[in-house]
């Protein structure tokens, strides 16, 4: 786990950044994290420990991409008690135009999978239709 400072005691945000295996292109870039409007340095995907002050914080995560510029945007508000560690998990979407998911660990799933499947079926039907027309003509 990457540690942004401090020892084992203190007030931290433990953030896990992940993407679906089918969206392997995310691996070529690294996500961006912003806490209360300030960019946090993260080295890439995986687990990160960010030192924060006790209190309420707004956490934003996205992936820099060609289109859209901020793919998989997600944000949430969290309360961090003094001398506590609060865990969050980010899951990038399957397609870049989908929204990312940010919240409690183990509850975040990738969005856009059903859209990809519907598009695949549409392309398959069109391709089969084109093949059928060329055979009949």
Image (cartoon, rainbow, N blue to C red):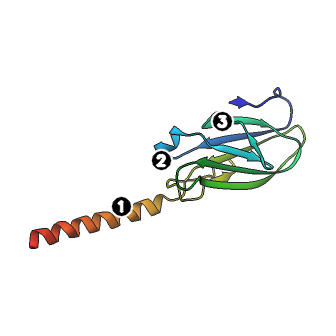
Residue name at image x 63 percent, y 49 percent:
62
Circle 2 Cα neighbour tier, 10 Å, few/some/many (<14 / 14–19 / ≥20): some
Residue name at image x 70 percent, y 41 percent:
15
Residue 23 circle label: 2
Q: In screen coordinates, is 50 left or right of 62?
A: right
**In this view of the protein, which residue sits in the foreground, 97 or 48?**
97
Distance Cα–Cα, label 1 vs label 3: 33 Å
Tell me which numbered mark, 2 or 1, is placed earlier along the sequence. 2
**Residue 110 location in percent, x, y?**
55, 53
Q: In screen coordinates, is 77 left or right of 130?
A: right
| The N terminus sits in image quarter | top right
Instruction: Farthest residue to the top: give it.
Output: 7
Vertical placement of 48 versus 71: above or below? Answer: above
Residue 93 circle label: none
Q: Element under label 3? A: strand
Q: In screen coordinates, is 10 left or right of 69?
A: right
Residue tagged by mark 3? Answer: 47
Q: In screen coordinates, is 130 left or right of 121?
A: left
Name the image quarter holding residue 14.
Answer: top right
Residue tagged by mark 1? Answer: 120
Q: Element under label 1? A: helix
Tell me which numbered mark, 1 or 3, is placed earlier along the sequence. 3
Q: Are the residues tagged 2 and 3 within 8 Å (C-beta)?
A: no
**Residue 95 location in percent, x, y?**
49, 55
Distance Cα–Cα, label 2 vs label 3: 19 Å
Distance Cα–Cα, label 2 vs label 1: 15 Å
């Amino acid at each position: 786990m990457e540690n942004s400072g401090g020892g084992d005691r203190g007030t931290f945000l433990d953030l896990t950044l992940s993407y679906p295996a089918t969206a392997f292109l995310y691996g070529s870039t690294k996500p961006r994290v912003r806490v209360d409007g300030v960019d946090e340095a993260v080295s890439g995907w995986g687990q990160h420990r960010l030192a924060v002050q006790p209190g309420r914080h707004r956490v934003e995560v996205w992936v820099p991409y060609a289109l859209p510029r901020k793919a998989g945007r997600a944000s949430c508000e969290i309360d961090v008690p003094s001398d506590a560690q609060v865990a969050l998990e980010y899951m990038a979407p399957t397609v870049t135009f989908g929204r990312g998911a940010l919240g409690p660990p183990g509850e975040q799933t990738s969005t856009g999978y059903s859209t990809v499947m519907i598009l695949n079926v549409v392309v398959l039907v069109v391709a089969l239709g084109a093949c059928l027309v060329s055979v009949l003509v």
